[in-house]
Amino acid sequence: MLNNICIYLFIYVFKIFQFSQRCSYECFSGVFGDTDVVSVMEGDSVSLNTDVTEVQREDQILWMFGPKETRIAELYKNSIDMFNSNERFGDRLQMDNQTGSLIIRNTRRTDSGLYKRQIRSHRGNSDKTFSVTVYAPLPVPVVTSNSSICSSSSSSSVSNCSLLCSAVNVSAVTLSWYKGNSLLSSISVSDLSISLSLPLEVEYQENNIYSCVINNPITNQTQHNINITQLCQPCAGSVHQKSAF
């Protein structure tokens, strides 16, 4: 009788152990300890680190992507499994067999999103989220003049010119006007891919140095040393009238 009880108890404990091992991945609730924000330029590679110096044989490291927590890579018992069912990444994913870190090569805008990492080990469990944003290369902003709204005062010899700084098909950027090192104005756009423009009224033939800058969190492009006299023409009848260029 006692032997039967011991056998049943052993089977019960063993089944609980099997379930817990399976549940460590399949039943994970999705609550993560902390989040790292990662920015990368499109086309570059990025490494999502596990903070593990060296993976032990019994360690289990699982990487997931997106709101559905789609499995994309796993390391267990020194064996790496890249889940081929995910066509989003193709062969651009790599997993370091020493640390379990995930490397994304030749990043694309569609790689932006949440990456979740689970570590199951006899030393303890660890969960972490990486918020990755892939930014498109920035265009150099284009500066043009709008002579149709150039104006001059009847009581003054000053002619004004309206400049327009523009960038096409941009998202998550800020467009800014500077006079020297001083910020004059700026406009920002979040995730939508749109054409962005920012006007600036200047005095014709003034000697100030203007520049237009477009930037995102990791890089910028600048249209330097804008020549006012080349871009602008004085209004008709102005004492500074100049032939068209």
Image (cartoon, rainbow, N blue to C red):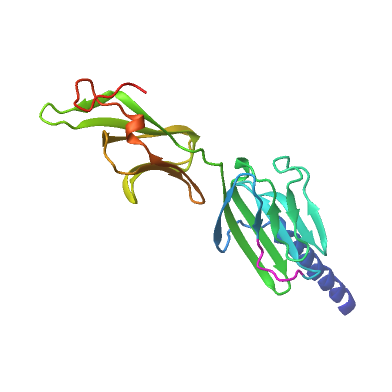
- Residue 33 percent location from the top left of the image: 57, 64
Depth order, front residue of 128/134: 134
- Residue 134 percent location from the top left of the image: 58, 46
Residue 115, placed above or below residue 10:
above
**Residue in view at x 76 percent, y 45 percent:** 91
Depth order, front residue of 194/75: 194
**Residues shaded magenta:** 49-55
User: Which image quadrant for residue 157?
Assistant: top left
User: Which image quadrant for residue 15?
Assistant: bottom right
What is the chief secondary structure element of the magenta stretch? loop
**Residue in view at x 77 percent, y 67 percent:** 17
Q: Is residue 53 magenta?
A: yes
Residue 244, placed above or below residue 140:
above
**Residue in view at x 59 percent, y 57 percent:** 129
Residue 12, placed above or below residue 217:
below
Q: Is residue 48 magenta?
A: no
Residue 245, placed above or below residue 16:
above
